[in-house]
Amino acid sequence: MKLRNEFLTHRNGEEAFVIPAEGADFSGLVRGNKTFGDIIDILKNDTAEQEIVNILSSKYDAPEEKIAHDVKKALSILREANALDEH
């Protein structure tokens, strides 16, 4: 899965944003924290959910279960915005 081309990303300090561009099936703004920003950065390339968890586990000192939960939550939010290409 990866972030759809119709979405732009932006980081502003501790916040990260996913913004629909022309042609997106979503109107609004998705906003998250720094970890959410890391997730959307990883999703700029085709990747699997477990790969995201593995990458974040090597970056953050947190239990893998907590990271996996946060990744699931972020992916759910992105799915609601139709921002993921899950071929």
Image (cartoon, helix red, strand yellow):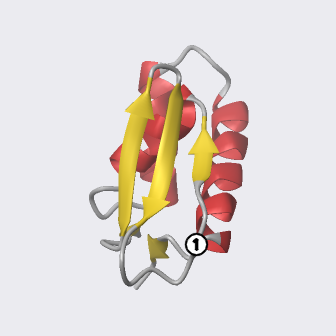
Residue 14 screen position, x and y as percent = 52, 21
Q: Is residue 86 above or below residue 35?
A: below
Residue in the picture at 35% in, 57% down: 8
Residue in the picture at 54% in, 30% down: 15
Nearer-the-camera pick, 86 or 64? 86
Nearer-the-camera pick, 25 or 76? 25
Look at the numbered disc 1 and give the secondary structure of its residue.
loop
Residue in the picture at 72% in, 44% down: 69
Q: Which residue corresponds to mark 1?
A: 27
Residue 77 screen position, x and y as percent = 67, 60
Q: Is residue 25 above or below residue 16?
A: below
Residue 55 screen position, x and y as percent = 40, 36
User: In the image, 54: left or right of 21?
Assistant: right
Q: Quadrant of residue 23?
A: bottom left
Can residue 54 be seen in this snapshot?
A: no
Can you name the residue that lies furthest to the top here? 61
Q: Is residue 11 above or below residue 73?
A: above
